Image (tube, rainbow, N blue to C red):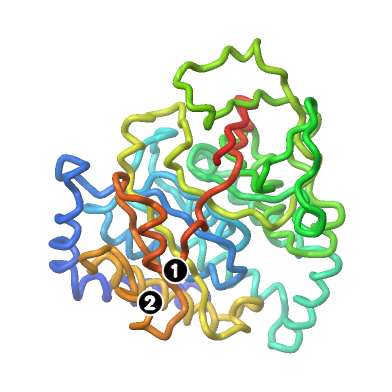
Amino acid sequence: MSAEFISQLRRYAQDAVHSVRAELVESLAQHTGNFANGPLVLDVALPGAAYFSVAAGGLADVLHFMGDHVHVDRFIGASGGACSLFLILANERSQRSMSGTGPCPDAEELLRSYLMYGESEGTGNWQRSWNACRQVFSGVSNFWEKRYEELLQDERAWTAVRHRAFCAVSARPIRQNLFGAPSESESLFHCKTDNYIMHSFSNRHEAVQSFVATGEATIKGFASGIPITAEATWDPINQDDGTSVPVASTARQRVKLPSSFCDGGHPVAFDSFLCPENAAERQRNFLLYYATWFENASDCLLCSPESIERLYKRGVDRTISCLLSPSFMSPAALSSDPQKDRMIIIASDSNLEEELGKVGKSGVLTGGTFVDLTRKELRQQA
């Protein structure tokens, strides 16, 4: 039943793309000047939205079926958005290099994993609701930890997640909201916005722990958190000091990070991230931001075949609408669409805040610290 259901859903996306393919190609051609008329290259940002983030599967399949004209590079997300980007990248089946772009992986693994999770939580809404309430206190089901570990056994999935996944977590969301940021310390680093972007994972365990932590919007998560960074020390690199001359690492005092993390982070733009690989090329990437909020609140908390179908199809429809829009934005105006989800694609030379303001999302992609788990470096955004 699962395989047939997944095929049926993916045919919906394939048919929807096929029906307007010529129009999509024409629309994309208007925006590819930065890429010498080659494929449009996207970074993708998926904010936290619990199981509303299933809609990212519809996004992935539309981009996959348009793979001759749209490529993807990096994904950044938090909470449910991070879960979805993990499942998309874990379905990478090409032998792509660590920083190479290419067609978006399809949504088959995402759909399969969310269906499996729904089945693990019970057969009816009452049982699923009870399990969801229980997890608020005891912590998120270990389903996701086991699933992440299983998927990363594939070397292609591990390479994709290791080099192209960016996972936002928080260290102390409740305490910081109540009492403000902690006092400065020379030896212990605290991100000003309590938003840590984990990336460039040095081993599979770090990746699994990061993606488990970003989903821990629970009493357990906020009280004890999930350990990620152990006892390592880190090299803080200031990206906002106005200088272009790097400071030798030997001249900076190394610091420690908080010991554990949980839900509460948010994606940020890559515009000020000094990426060590292919920096010049990646600066041209467009940024796709998809706010996956919807009207049916139960779809946010519970996973069922019915909710997965609804959300996946909404993702397909919204992505096609955005790609067809002359402004790369859907809906075209905030008052023109009663639906709550929003998508915008922002050119690298556009003003980020002005563009996000057009979909009512100013300020949502700023403020965070990139935590390079391989190089043991910290880069703090404004």
Looking at the image, is mark 2 or mark 1 earlier in the sequence? 2
Residue that mark 1 sits on? 360
Q: Is residue 54 left or right of residue 209?
A: left
Asked if disc 2 and disc 1 are in contact, CB closer than 8 Å, the reply is yes
Residue 119 in sight: yes
Q: Picture coordinates of residue 47 (x, y %)?
A: 54, 60
| Amino acid at the residue labelled 2 | Leu
At x 76% / y 47%, what residue is drawn?
181
At x 27% / y 75%, what residue is drawn?
16
Q: Picture coordinates of residue 39 (x, y %)?
A: 22, 48
Residue that mark 2 sits on? 334
Question: In the image, is residue 163 above or below residue 255?
Answer: below
Q: Picture coordinates of residue 52 (x, y %)?
A: 55, 73
Q: Judging from the image, what secondary structure is the residue with disc 1 in? A: loop
Q: Residues within 10 Å of mark 1 (few under 14, many from 20)?
A: some
Question: What is the quadrant of residue 182 in the picture?
Answer: top right
| Amino acid at the residue labelled 1 | Gly
Q: Is residue 270 left or right of residue 205?
A: left
Q: Picture coordinates of residue 371 (x, y %)?
A: 62, 36
At x 77% / y 53%, what residue is drawn?
176
At x 38% / y 77%, what residue is drawn?
334
